[in-house]
C-alpha cells in the first residue's frame, strides 16, 4: 500500500535517476512555485515552455534562477504544447505538466494522430486522496476526463489505474466498482457493468488486480460496515482504486472529500505515452506540487 504523499516523496528521494517534467505555458506563478519546490527537494528537473520573459520575471520574483537552455521560447499556447510533446517523443522529457493554457489546447497536441502521444488506450483521470480517516491513499477514477464510460471504457479505466498503482509499488491493487447497492439490479446499469467487470477479472481479462462490484461506498471504505452486513470481500475496507459510474459522480465525490472530509488531493492524466499533470488553473501550488510527485512516481 501507499500510506501517504509523504511516503511517495520519500521514495522519490531514494531514486537515482531524477525525472524531467516539461511545463507547458509555464508563465504561471502557482505552477512555478510547485516546480521550484520539487526541484529544490531534488525530486524533479524541469524544462519550461512559453513566454520566456514572463517566465524569467516570475522566477526572479520567486528568487529562483534557471539556465537559459531550460526555458524554451514559444509564441502561442498551441506551439508550447506541440513543442513539449515533441520533446517527449525525442526522449528529453519523462512527463508533462499543464501551465497557463486551456486544457483543450494541451490535449489537442497530446492526442494528435501523427505527432502526439497516443498509445491506443483511452485517456483517463486519477485523483489520489489522502484522508485522515483512511489508512492509505485512495484513488478515484474517472472524475475528470471520461464523461459516461461504457463497459469497455470502464475496463480500460481500471487497467490505466492498475498500471499506475503497480508502477508506484502496489503489486495487486484492490479495485471497487462503486454502486448504491451490492446486488445486480436491472434498473441500475452501473450494477450490471460492475458485475461484468468483476467477472472479467475472475477469468483473467482484467489482470494484476482484484476487482469487486457492485459494492457501495460504505462497504468499500469501512470494514466494520461490511462485517455488519455480512459482506465478504478482500476489497471491503481496503480498496486502492474506486471506479465511479460517470464523471458527475467522480467529480462530486472528489470535491466532497476535499472540502468536507479534509482530504489532501492530487490528480494526473494517464493513458498517453507519459503521465500528465493536468490540474485546473485554480488549483493551489500544493495540489500542483503533489501532482508532480505522483507523475514522477508513476514514470518507470
Image (cartoon, helix red, strand yellow):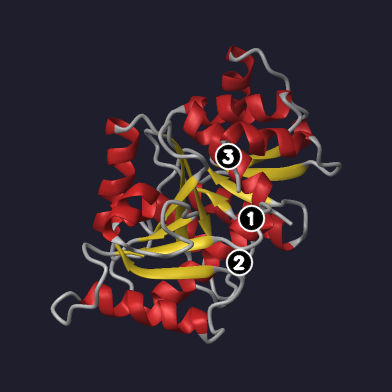
Q: Residues within 10 Å of mark 1 (few under 14, many from 20)?
A: some
Q: Residues within 10 Å of mark 2 (few under 14, many from 20)?
A: many
Q: CA distance from mark 3 to mark 2?
A: 31 Å
Question: Would residue 211 appear left or right of 20 to someone viewing this image?
Answer: left
Tag 1 secondary structure: loop
- Mark 1 touching mark 3, by CB under 8 A? no
Q: Earlier in the sequence, mark 1 or mark 3?
A: 3
Q: CA distance from mark 1 to mark 3?
A: 11 Å
Is residue 79 depicted above or below 198 in this figure? Answer: above
Which residue corresponds to the image point at 74% horizontal and 57% vertical from the top-left?
Answer: 300
- Residue that carries the numbered disc 3 in the rendered image: 3
Q: Residues within 10 Å of mark 3 (few under 14, many from 20)?
A: some
Q: Tell us which disc is closer to us: 2 or 1.
A: 1
- Residue that carries the numbered disc 2 in the rendered image: 117
Which of the 4 image quarters holds residue 74?
top right
Which is more toward the observer, 272 or 202? 202
Q: Earlier in the sequence, mark 2 or mark 1?
A: 2
Which circle marks residue 170 in the picture? 1
Which of the 4 image quarters holds residue 143?
bottom left
- Mark 3 touching mark 2, by CB under 8 A? no
- Mark 2 touching mark 1, by CB under 8 A? no
Q: Tell us which disc is closer to us: 3 or 2.
A: 3
Residue that lies at the very extreme toward the right in this rendered image: 16
Tag 3 secondary structure: loop
Which residue corresponds to the image point at 59% horizontal and 19% vertical from the top-left?
Answer: 57
Is residue 210 depicted above or below 1 in this figure? Answer: below
Which is more toward the observer, 256 or 94? 256
Which circle marks residue 295 in the picture? none
Amino acid at each position: 500500500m501507499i500510506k501517504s504523499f509523504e511516503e511517495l516523496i520519500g521514495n522519490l528521494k531514494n531514486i537515482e535517476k531524477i525525472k524531467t517534467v516539461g511545463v507547458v505555458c509555464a508563465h504561471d506563478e502557482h505552477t512555478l512555485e510547485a516546480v521550484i519546490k520539487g526541484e529544490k527537494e531534488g525530486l524533479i528537473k524541469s524544462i519550461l515552455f512559453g513566454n520566456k520573459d514572463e517566465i524569467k520575471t516570475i522566477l526572479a520574483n520567486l528568487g529562483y534562477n534557471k539556465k537559459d537552455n531550460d526555458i524554451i521560447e514559444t509564441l502561442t499556447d498551441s506551439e508550447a504544447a506541440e513543442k513539449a510533446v515533441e520533446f517527449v517523443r525525442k526522449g528529453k522529457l519523462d512527463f508533462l505538466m499543464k501551465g497557463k493554457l486551456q486544457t483543450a489546447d494541451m490535449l489537442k497536441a497530446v492526442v494528435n494522430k501523427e505527432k502526439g502521444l497516443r498509445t491506443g488506450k483511452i485517456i483517463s483521470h486519477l485523483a489520489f486522496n489522502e484522508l485522515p480517516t483512511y489508512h492509505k491513499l485512495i484513488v478515484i477514477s474517472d472524475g475528470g476526463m471520461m464523461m459516461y464510460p461504457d463497459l469497455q471504457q470502464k475496463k480500460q479505466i481500471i487497467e490505466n489505474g492498475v498500471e499506475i498503482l503497480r508502477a508506484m509499488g502496489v503489486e495487486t491493487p484492490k479495485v471497487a466498482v462503486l454502486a448504491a447497492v451490492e446486488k445486480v439490479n436491472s434498473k441500475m446499469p452501473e450494477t450490471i457493468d460492475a458485475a461484468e467487470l468483476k467477472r472479467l477479472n475472475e477469468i483473467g481479462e482484467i489482470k494484476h488486480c482484484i476487482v469487486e462490484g457492485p459494492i457501495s461506498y460504505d462497504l468499500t471504505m469501512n470494514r466494520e460496515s461490511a462485517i455488519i452486513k455480512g459482506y465478504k470481500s478482500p476489497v471491503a475496507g481496503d480498496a486502492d482504486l474506486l471506479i465511479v459510474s460517470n464523471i458527475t459522480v467522480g467529480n462530486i465525490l472528489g470535491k466532497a472529500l476535499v472540502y468536507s472530509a479534509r482530504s489532501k488531493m492530487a490528480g494526473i492524466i494517464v493513458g498517453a505515452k507519459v503521465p500528465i499533470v493536468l490540474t485546473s488553473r485554480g488549483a493551489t501550488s500544493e495540489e500542483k506540487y503533489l501532482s508532480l510527485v505522483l507523475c514522477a512516481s508513476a514514470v518507470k
